[in-house]
Image (cartoon, grey):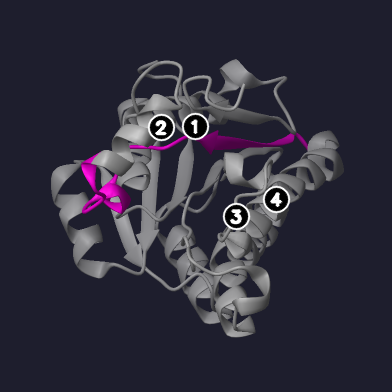
Amino acid sequence: MSGALDSKVALVTGAAGGIGGAVVRRLVADGARVLGTDVDGPGLERLAADISGARVHAADITSPEGVESLFAALDAAFGRIDILVNNAGIGGPRTKRLHELDLSEYDAVMAANLRAPLALTRAALPLMIAQGGGAIVNLASPAGMHAVPRVGPYSISKAGVIMLTKQTAKEYAADGIRCNAVAPGVTDTAILDGLPKAHLDQIVAMIPQGRIARPDEIAAMIAFLASDAASFVNGSVVLVDGAAGT
């Protein structure tokens, strides 16, 4: 889809991660001007060195000051926003049932996975309305559709992301703004580093296509939803999981 995003300006969160980096690469390849953000400053520097044309700005998007500085940097660099990709997020506790959680653990996951996308969407919407439209793509998860034992905060946050997606789509469709979500299956990123091979084999055995996803496959769907080729796709949650959730 080279050229599909010519003249578009995109903001991508979690850009120093595996999926985020792949999204930046794909959007740039499709012609977009991209600002990537993350709390990982060195990771952003590596990203900028690796992808010609990508700009970066380190920010903590869980804080109002971080969101403000990010949009100030975006305005200084490009003066507009056509595409927002809310990719950043954290996994949170993976061994506790709900009654075993400290509420601070729950709050941390919700701040990163749900409040931050809401804050960024809230900041982007007036700009998109003023310029006549835009596209927002949120990163949801199959865990937001089906409860996963012992990862309650993550599942609850991603369920919230799905409703944020639908709410945004319905409220702003008349303003020319589309909002969709991608729900990746297990993807080959650093989060799998150190996972025992036997455990990974069990995961792969549950995927009908017999493998995990590549980051570029997730990025391809995000780029499509951000493009005018998806002009009548709004409020959708797209599984990219090799039929695992089918």
Q: Residue at x 37, y 34 (%)?
A: 202
Q: Picture quarter containing residue 145?
A: top right
Separation of residues labelled 3 and 1 (CA atoms):
28 Å
The local secondary structure at tag 3 comes to loop
- State the extent of the magenta-drawn residues as a range: 175-197
Identified by mark 2, the residue type is Ala
Amino acid on which disc 3 is placed? Pro
- Please give the label number shown on residue 219: 2
Relative to 246, residue 60 above or below:
below
Question: Is 81 drawn above or below residue 245 in the view shown?
Answer: below
Q: Whole-percent x and y of residue 246?
A: 62, 21
Q: Are marks 4 and 3 in contact (CB under 8 Å)?
A: no
Residues at badges 1 and 2 in contact (C-beta under 8 Å)? yes
The residue tagged with tag 2: helix, strand or loop? Answer: helix
Left or right: 61, with 24 as reference point:
right
Tag 4, which secondary structure? helix
Q: Would you say the residues marked 3 and 1 are in contact, meaning their CB atoms lie under 8 Å apart?
A: no
Looking at the rendering, in which quadrant would you find the N terminus? top left
